[in-house]
Amino acid sequence: MTIAFQIILLIVILFTCLGTLGARNNENLRTNSTAICISAIAALLISALYL
């Protein structure tokens, strides 16, 4: 179950990083994608350390 959660987080990180890099005209989308990416990275680190 933990590995599935970490795989889902890696997919979220990948898509949000691509969204952050690809959204040049829409500042709101870029800001939201960056926030989701940072929170997914934090969740991945926490799940790797504590679960």
Image: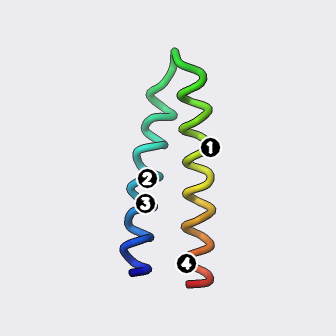
* 3 to 22, vertically: above or below: below
Q: Earlier in the sequence, mark 4 or mark 1?
A: 1
User: Residue 3: x and y, percent?
Assistant: 39, 78
Q: CA distance from mark 4 to mark 3?
A: 12 Å
Disc 1 residue crowd, few under 14, some 14–19, many 20+, Cα 10 Å: some
Disc 3 residue crowd, few under 14, some 14–19, many 20+, Cα 10 Å: some
Give the residue at mark 4: 48
Q: CA distance from mark 1 to mark 2?
A: 12 Å
Mark 3 touches mark 2? (CB < 8 Å)? yes
Give the residue at mark 1: 35
- Toward which corner of the image does residue 15 lie, by quadrant? top left
Of marks 3 and 1, the one in the foreground: 1
Left or right of residue 34: residue 8: left
- Toward which corner of the image does residue 42 lie, by quadrant? bottom right
Q: Earlier in the sequence, mark 4 or mark 3?
A: 3
User: Residue 37: x and y, percent?
Assistant: 55, 48
Secondary element under disc 2, as helix, strand or loop, is helix
- Is residue 32 or residue 20 the one in the foreground? 32
- Toward which corner of the image does residue 48 lie, by quadrant? bottom right
Amino acid carrying label 1: it is Ala
User: Residue 41: x and y, percent?
Assistant: 57, 59
